[in-house]
Amino acid sequence: MKNNIFPPLTSISFTINTGYLHSLHIETSGNATGIPVVFLHGGPGSSCNENHRRYFNPEQYFIITFDQRGCGLSTPKGELADNTSQHLINDLEQIRKHLNIGQWLIFGGSWGACLGLLYAQAFPERVNGMILRGCFLAREQDLFWFSQHGASEVFPEEWQLFIQDIPVNERADLVAAFYQRLHHGDHATQLKYAAIWADWSSKVATHNLSSSSSKRKPDETLILKVKIETHYAFHRYFIEENQILNNITALPKVPVTIIHGELDRTCLLSASRQLAASIPNSELIVLTNTGHLIEESNMIDALVAATDQFITTYEHNTTK
């Protein structure tokens, strides 16, 4: 059955104060005694919504979603201080402890997959499985494809719109060019370049969909979102080059399912292939006629099938 997504769920919302500055917005739903799973949203700079709870059987899963630092309903909104990958990893661990969870399933896509892998390497004993979608490994080559050369060849007209207002002498490092305008420009400049960045990102992510989304009107929320995204990109996601693959043996020996759309032009399939080849007994599922977005029909079906399969695996492992 196509689009076998679970019905909308009600949730319990609360906040966790991480210490000096940030408070995280967290929601839980499903079966409080079920299999704990944490949903890691993408971006960086995006947020969670009610549909992100619908990939899990609510009778079997205890579902945790949260907005990462500065994102969504977490506060201060758009805050960049104390906002690094290591802070996010530690936030995950604080959430786990707060909910008194021993181990949980990591479920993340794109940037969320990257964060999930970093967390699993830092706290391997706390992870009992991983379901990853459209993996982003935060290497120089992954960022280069999106922001410098690669996707530019696939979408040449949209690329020209992306770069046309950047002086030629700054085009060798477009992340730095956009970062400078978004973080140090006046408000009008921030509005303009947030919209340009978001339009390019949207085109690359939605290119295979029959109904393309209309351009989003730039506003303060969009500025904050793109500022977080460029904050992470400019600082190369606050990790060492190729950190995930270089430390692959730090991952726990747990079931890992990697799902990637063949038409994904935001995060290349080659990254997921390299990741799967590096993790013994992992499963790589490549979806035809499917791009980057979690809401695509084939992706929905594959993710729900993966979470259903993990129930069987979990029950088998816990009854040994």
Image (cartoon, rainbow, N blue to C red):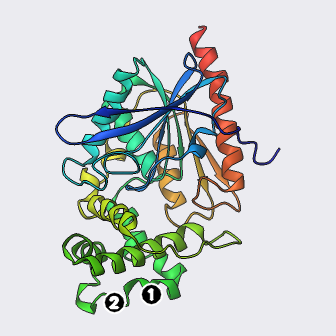
The residue that mark 1 highlights is 161
Is label 1 in a helix, a strand or a loop? helix
Residue type (three-letter) at the residue carrying disc 1: Leu
Check the image and report above or below for 11 versus 76.
above
Please give the name of the residue rendered at 60% of the width and 45% of the height, measured from the top-left corner.
51
Check the image and report above or below for 305 versus 177.
above
Check the image and report above or below for 281 versus 214.
above
Please give the name of the residue rendered at 25% of the width and 34% of the height, measured from the top-left corner.
18
Please give the name of the residue rendered at 30% of the width and 77% of the height, measured from the top-left corner.
174
The answer to whether one can see residue 305 in this image is yes
The residue that mark 2 highlights is 165
- Indicate left or right for 147 with 276 as reference: left
Check the image and report above or below for 204 versus 256.
below
The residue lying furthest to the right in this view is 1
The alpha-carbon separation of the residues under discs 1 and 2 comes to 8 Å
Q: Nearer the viewer, residue 217 or 304?
A: 217
Q: Nearer the viewer, residue 50 or 174?
A: 50
Query: Are there few (<14), some (14-19), or many (20+) residues within 10 Å of tag 1?
Result: some
Location of the C terminus (image quadrant): top right
Query: Picture coordinates of residue 289 (x, y %)?
Result: 71, 62
Where is residue 198, by image quadrant? bottom left
Query: Picture coordinates of residue 211 (x, y %)?
Result: 69, 72
Residue type (three-letter) at the residue carrying disc 2: Asp
Query: Are there few (<14), some (14-19), or many (20+) residues within 10 Å of tag 2?
Result: few
